[in-house]
Image (cartoon, grey):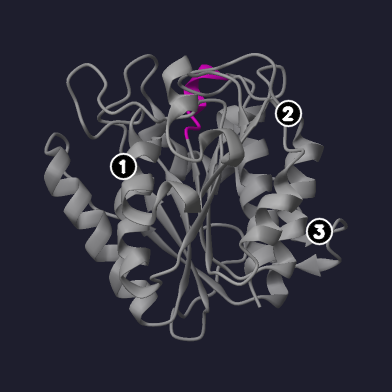
Amino acid sequence: MRFLCSSALIKKSKTVLVGVPYDGTSTFRPGSRFAPLSIRESSYGLESYSPYQDKDLREIKFFDIGDIPLSHSDLQLNLKIIESFILKLILKGKKTVCLGGEHLISYPIVKAYKKKYKDLAIIHLDAHSDLANSFRGEKFSHATVMRRIAELVGFENLYQLGIRSMVRENRLLPKRKENMCMFNLSKAEEYLNESKDKPIYVSIDLDILDTAYFPGTGTPEPGGITFKELLTFILSLRDFHVVGVDVVELSPHYDQSGISSITAASIVKELLLSISD
């Protein structure tokens, strides 16, 4: 199954949708490996037209390539597979919209992008800072992913929005006070403007949304933003050089209503329309 209105030909598509069904380091409520399929299925309940953007999915060229085939248990192998898969796409001039999976998938994706874009900036939306140096003895984890990414791109190029769960020490890391917006997206425009001359990679952990709107996630955190607030941010991306996006941490079976999956599919739709030419 492909996402709603996916093109039949990858060669004519500038944007590629990629499923990354991995949740091997999830420590509280696993299940995000089922998200790519759930998002695709839920997309067929949406209209292709966006009144927010006055654009239609049928008017843009994007290709849903399906899921990356991954190992069930070999973490390091999976990191290499994801990096290699994404690198091949971006070296062919494609933008990628990746569907997690847990947040660790962002690390090998960013690693691939960094090989093409040396001055890459990262905009990270999340309830959690993900800045631990290790978590339960593991250096590569959903809880350490932004620490690893900051080591790739530099802490000064990592901008974090919506954070409301962290340890105090993380705010003492280089540039954290300047580049971390607590609780909401009030500094989104400022962060984007600071990066306006750089290629930007956007990583959206869906637990940035309040649990009232989005219960279907592995580590829910009350006090989040609304869908409309996230949509406002997505619409603002149209004016910047966004080279890639990931949407992670939907765990569909924790929301039997299916609303979380529908919300995730709608977010992916708006992202495709916002960053595609």
Residue 23 locus on image (x, y percent): 31, 32
Q: Which residue is mark 3?
A: 50
Between disc 3 and disc 2, whose residue precedes? 3
Disc 3 crowd, CA 10 A, few/some/many (<14, 14-19, 20+)? some
Amino acid type at mark 2: Ile
Residue at screen point 49% across, 19% down: 166
Amino acid type at mark 3: Ser
- Whole-angstrom CA distance, mark 3 to mark 1, is 36 Å
Q: Which residue is mark 1?
A: 148
- Whole-angstrom CA distance, mark 2 to mark 1, is 26 Å
- Whole-angstrom CA distance, mark 3 to mark 2, is 21 Å
Residue at screen point 66% across, 47% down: 267
Q: As displayed, is residue 216 above or below residue 196?
A: above
Q: Nearer the viewer, residue 193 or 234?
A: 193
Q: Which residue is mark 2?
A: 225
Q: Is residue 250 magenta?
A: yes
Task: Find the residue positioned furthest to the bottom.
Answer: 12
Residue at screen point 58% across, 19% down: 256
Disc 2 crowd, CA 10 A, few/some/many (<14, 14-19, 20+)? many
Q: Secondary structure at mark 3?
A: strand
Q: Specify start and end residues of the magenta stretch as a single range.
A: 249-255
Between disc 3 and disc 1, whose residue precedes? 3
Disc 1 crowd, CA 10 A, few/some/many (<14, 14-19, 20+)? many
The quadrant the C terminus occupies is bottom right
Residue 55 locus on image (x, y percent): 80, 68
Query: In the image, which disc is placed on residue 208?
Result: none
Viewer-nearest of labels 2 and 1?
A: 1
Q: Is residue 207 visible in this depiction of the protein?
A: yes
